[in-house]
Image (tube, rainbow, N blue to C red):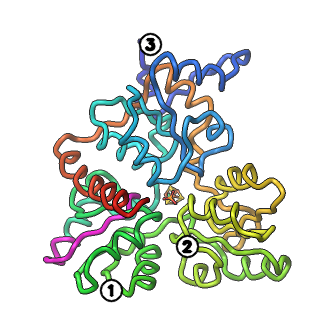
Amino acid sequence: METIDKKWKEQGYIDQPVDKNIDLKTEIRRMCKEKNAVLMAHYYTVGDVQDVADFVGDSLALAQKAAQTDADIIVMCGVHFMGETNKILCPEKTILIPDTNASCSLAESCPADKFAEFVKAHPGHTVISYVNTSAATKAVTDVVVTSSNAKLIVGSFPQDTPMIFGPDKNLGGYINKITGRNMILWDGACHVHSRFSVSGILKLKAEHPNAKVLAHPECKDEVLSIADKVGSTAALLKFCLDDEAHEFIVATESGILYEMEKGAPQKTFIPAPEEGKCGCNECEYMKLITLEKVYNCLKYEFPTIEVDEEIAKKAVRPINRMLEISKQMGL
Ligand code: 13P
Ligand code: SF4
């Protein structure tokens, strides 16, 4: 095993320069085979990382794959909470993340101690948490949901069940609306999805009248109400591949455009603009995961994701509950 530099520990990633003559993708695949490692990537990572991954998916699919894999090492090319979910589900495996600074503004908008106070202030309420939360927040949760299964899981409870939902007020508000529930919402949001501009989307719509608007449920209600399709990254991808339209305005993180363009090269995908800008909207945390960092992380088997055992014991229950309900519902 290579030695881990003190500087790398402090900065949370390895910045060892990579030999220019190495074909990174071939080397990464070779190391995966040699070390019995599986590389999983979220749709928001850069195209090169998606290309080299064994599996690319949304948060639900990534958790489902982690629960099933027999690999010894999982390299999570995504953000920190995704790696934590893997560690909670597979405590005996080594979980690597190429850069531990790959955080999530939504998860950060819900500190576990404050969320525990919120839970305490609402006795008798079922606690639903979005997967974009820390392990410690999941530990005070009854059921975890993702954007793929939130509607079905919330809808599986009797209509009059008192519930609280955290941390995304946009997703929670949307689920309340479509299920007729009245969940009490934590006041959190994703900085990427909450900044899409309604006027910018309407302007694009005027220029491309046949384009359909696709939006992730983390977007604000004003954006969701003008969307033709609201769904998780996987649902939006499926919709644009199956639908007869040829143009789509995409209101989610722009990494998804890579898979969309790959799946339907004859169609046009236009990233929705953010407030005050005309370019696309990127999650800077997802973009921290580069091919060089994936290579170094596999080579040195560092950085790893660790979760406190007591927290993991509590957090595994609501995650497994989500996976069981999803399975029962055919997701
Ligand atoms: P998905 O569950 O749709 O993959 O979304 C994850 C996420 O981080 C959205 O910002
Ligand atoms: Fe978190 Fe938003 Fe980035 Fe998704 S896009 S990982 S919710 S900060």
Q: In this view, does 161 lie to the left or right of 90?
A: left
Q: Is mark 1 on a helix, strand or loop?
A: loop
Q: Name the residue under label 3.
A: 2
Residue 306 coordinates in the image, percent (x, y): 31, 36
229 or 258, which is in the foreground?
229
- Does residue 44 sit above or below 70 in this rendering? below
Q: Which mark, by number, is residue 58? A: none
Left/right placement of residue 265 relative to residue 168 reads right
- Tell me which amino acid carries mark 1: Asn
- Quadrant in which the C terminus appears: bottom left
275 on left or right of 115:
right
The image quadrant of residue 219 is: bottom right
The answer to which of marks 2 and 3 sits earlier in the sequence is 3
Between disc 1 and disc 3, whose residue precedes? 3
Residue sitting at 63 percent across and 72 percent down? 196
The residue at which mark 1 appears reads as 182
Q: Which of marks 1 and 3 is in front?
A: 1
Residues 3 and 306: in front is: 306
Label 3 sits on what residue type? Glu
Helix, strand or loop at mark 3: loop
Residue 320 image point, x, y percent: 28, 52
Circle 2/circle 1 CB separation < 8 Å: no
Residue under the point 63% across and 61% down: 238
Q: What stretch is highlighted in magenta?
A: 119-132
